[in-house]
Amino acid sequence: MATTAMISLAEYMQTTYRPDREYIDGEVRERNVGKRDHARIQALLTMWFGSQEAAWGLIVFTEWRTQVSQTRVRIPDLVLVSDGPQPDVLVEPPVLVVEILSPDDTYADTQERAADYRRMGVQTVWIIDPKTRTGRYCVNDSWTAAERLIVPGTPVFADLNDLFARLDRKPA
């Protein structure tokens, strides 16, 4: 990822980037934007979560600036938050953060993002890898590989086998 500038948090918050960029300790960083499989998984999860919003009492958002600390703003692929009014920049820990790996993402970058979410107070983080067709979730700093990703203590889940089957499905 390329570093583009050193600016204040206030300046970052007032600036629009296309595509949006993260803010890490004064640096505005480009992020890997999704390619086909990343975009499709993001769309499928958004549709699934959207269909469950009323039952779960949660709302799904994509690529919402999330201030994880005083000096860092991340842009997760998906978040689930409690129903109700929300600010322009998410500052309260969401119920769930989902990161979908892009082909150019590195393990170290992904772990750094996940650690930021955990320090923010996010109880559950999911990481989905379209290339290897795998997923894992983190609860209390413990990572679990699973075909069914969950958020403990809630009805929230996603079946990766179904998700990946839909990824492979050809249009009729």
Image: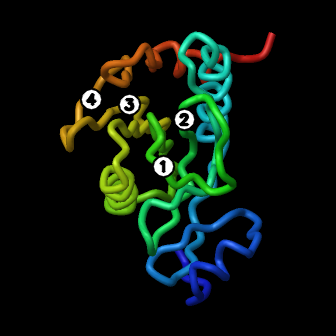
Q: CA distance from mark 2 to mark 4?
A: 23 Å
- Left/right placement of residue 52 relative to residue 140 reads right
- Sequence-wise, which precedes: disc 2 or disc 4? 2
Q: Earlier in the sequence, mark 2 or mark 3?
A: 2
Query: Which scheme is used to colour this image of the protein?
Result: rainbow
Residues at marks 3 and 1, CA–CA distance in whole angstroms: 28 Å
Q: Secondary structure at mark 4?
A: strand
Please tell me in which quadrant of the rendered image residue 38 appears: top right
Dot 1: few (<14), some (14–19), or many (≥20) neighbours within 10 Å?
some
Question: Which of 30 and 117 lies nearest the eye of the viewer?
Answer: 117
Nearest-to-viewer mark from 2 and 4 = 2
Q: Which residue is mark 1?
A: 92
- Tell me what residue is drawn at x 52 percent, y 82 percent: 27
Give the class, few, some or many, for how many residues have Cα within 10 Å of label 4's Cα (few <14, many ≥20): some
Give the percent coordinates (x, y) of residue 87. 66, 51
The label on residue 81 is 2
Q: Secondary structure at mark 1?
A: loop
**Disc 3 marks which residue?**
134
